């Protein structure tokens, strides 16, 4: 398959990442089928694509898009609760919860539902692509396509080959990423690849420094911005990522590497268990809300 042959893109999971990826794909001109478990999640995702903080209407307000264009893009996205609707997709990007068993179950189903030539890609932040590929027969047409949050804004796509990913699949994923206005960079297949392995260390370290009283949440965020020029501090970034996703990643990184500095600190577990999942639908808030800190 060549990149020009791609017409329909499937996105599985319409959460923080999935809805943003669907938005970018539809804006590029693709027909998009966006699958999640419930009508309610899909409705929220469609609302965010249209009117969320990184949604299309924001571009209308800035004079960069017309109302008609918004309507045309929205009409390209078909929400669905059935994976079977992906039978005609040419390229499928999975963005469900960061759990290996769940992802493998979905990929095994997609392998049966999708056309033989369809490429299956995972947006996992950390799980090894060679491991997820064990769920499918089409290991040559399986790849890691790691987007960043918010998907409509962030430029990088970390492209990760599994042990058996073909050059054709890799090249096509690179071309598709470019077509969608992104900058693809290859990283090796290991837990967390490059970006997650790197960032998980310093996010976990920020929590530990808070736990032992070296700095408060707001102070650590401010110090990172003022000292290092970071656009946001580690606690703000964790709220954006989603604390449940952050916890799944840290658990996986520790399990795979047995390196203590990746292990999730207790405070992170406490927030997630209490329903503080950061800035995402259904969450009670993030670090600042749990500790009652004024921003
Ligand atoms: N949040 C980030 O900053 C970020 C950045 C890059 C990559 N990722 C990765 O993207 C993936 C999704 O993360 P997220 O932040 O969007 O999580 P999220 O919790 O916001 O969304 C996950 C979605 O998956 C859906 N889902 C669960 N089981 C499903 C099933 N069986 N079928 C269909 N949908 C199902 C959930 O209903 C939910 O809407 C994860 O692998 C994560 O590691 C996250």
Image: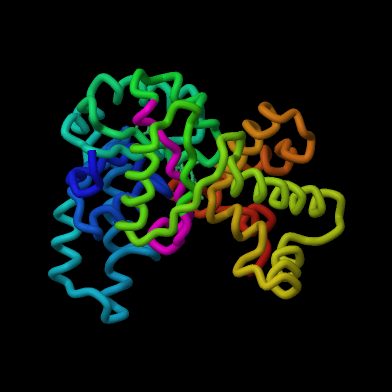
Q: Residue extending furthest front?
A: 167
Q: Position of residue 278 (x, y in %)?
A: 55, 51
Q: Position of residue 162 (x, y in %)?
A: 48, 31
Q: Position of residue 96 (x, y in %)?
A: 41, 36
Q: Is residue 168 left or right of residue 194?
A: left
Q: Residue at x 75, y 73 (%)?
A: 227
Q: Residue extending furthest bottom?
A: 63
Q: Is residue 155 magenta?
A: yes
Q: From the viewer's perspective, is residue 81 above or below residue 291? A: above
Q: Is residue 25 magenta?
A: no
Q: Is residue 269 visible?
A: yes
Q: Residue at x 20, y 49 (%)?
A: 4
Q: Nearer the viewer, residue 131 or 41?
A: 131
> Quadrant of the image for the N terminus?
top left
Q: Residue at x 16, y 68 (%)?
A: 69
Q: Is residue 244 visible?
A: no
Q: Is residue 166 left or right of residue 191?
A: left
Q: From the viewer's perspective, is residue 158 above or below residue 131? A: below
Q: Position of residue 153 (x, y in %)?
A: 42, 64
Q: Residue at x 70, y 65 (%)?
A: 221
> Quadrant of the image for the C terminus?
bottom right
Please tell me how many numbered marks the rendered image carries.
0
For the magenta stretch, what is the residue range?
140-156
Image quadrant, ligand 1: top left
Q: Is residue 136 left or right of residue 156?
A: left
Figure colour scheme: rainbow
Rendered image quadrant of residue 274? top right
Q: Nearer the viewer, residue 291 or 261?
A: 261
């Amino acid at each position: 398959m060549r990149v020009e042959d791609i017409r329909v893109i499937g996105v599985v999971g319409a959460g923080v990442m999935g809805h943003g990826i669907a938005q970018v794909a539809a804006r590029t001109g693709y027909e998009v089928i966006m699958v999640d478990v419930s009508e309610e999640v899909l409705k929220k995702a469609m609302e965010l694509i249209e009117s969320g903080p990184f949604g299309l209407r924001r571009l209308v307000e800035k004079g960069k898009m017309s109302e008609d264009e918004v309507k045309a893009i929205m009409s390209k996205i078909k929400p669905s609760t059935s994976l079977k609707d992906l039978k005609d997709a040419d390229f499928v990007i999975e963005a469900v919860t960061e759990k290996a068993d769940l992802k493998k179950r979905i990929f095994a189903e997609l392998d049966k539902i999708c056309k033989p030539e369809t490429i299956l890609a995972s947006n996992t932040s950390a799980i090894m692509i060679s491991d997820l590929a064990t769920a499918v027969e089409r290991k040559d047409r399986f790849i890691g396509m790691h987007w960043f949050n918010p998907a409509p804004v962030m430029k990088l796509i970390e492209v990760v080959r599994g042990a058996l990913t073909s050059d054709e699949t890799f090249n096509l994923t690179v071309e598709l990423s470019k077509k969608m206005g992104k900058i693809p960079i290859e990283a090796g297949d290991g837990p967390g690849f490059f970006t997650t392995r790197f960032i998980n260390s310093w996010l976990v370290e920020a929590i530990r420094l808070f736990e032992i009283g070296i700095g408060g949440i707001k102070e650590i965020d401010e110090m990172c911005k003022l000292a290092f020029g970071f656009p946001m501090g580690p606690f703000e970034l964790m709220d954006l990522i989603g604390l449940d996703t952050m916890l799944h990643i840290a658990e996986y990184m520790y399990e795979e590497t047995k390196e203590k500095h990746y292990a999730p600190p207790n405070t992170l577990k406490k927030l997630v268990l209490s329903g503080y999942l950061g800035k995402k639908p259904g969450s009670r808030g993030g670090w600042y809300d749990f500790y009652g800190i004024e921003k």
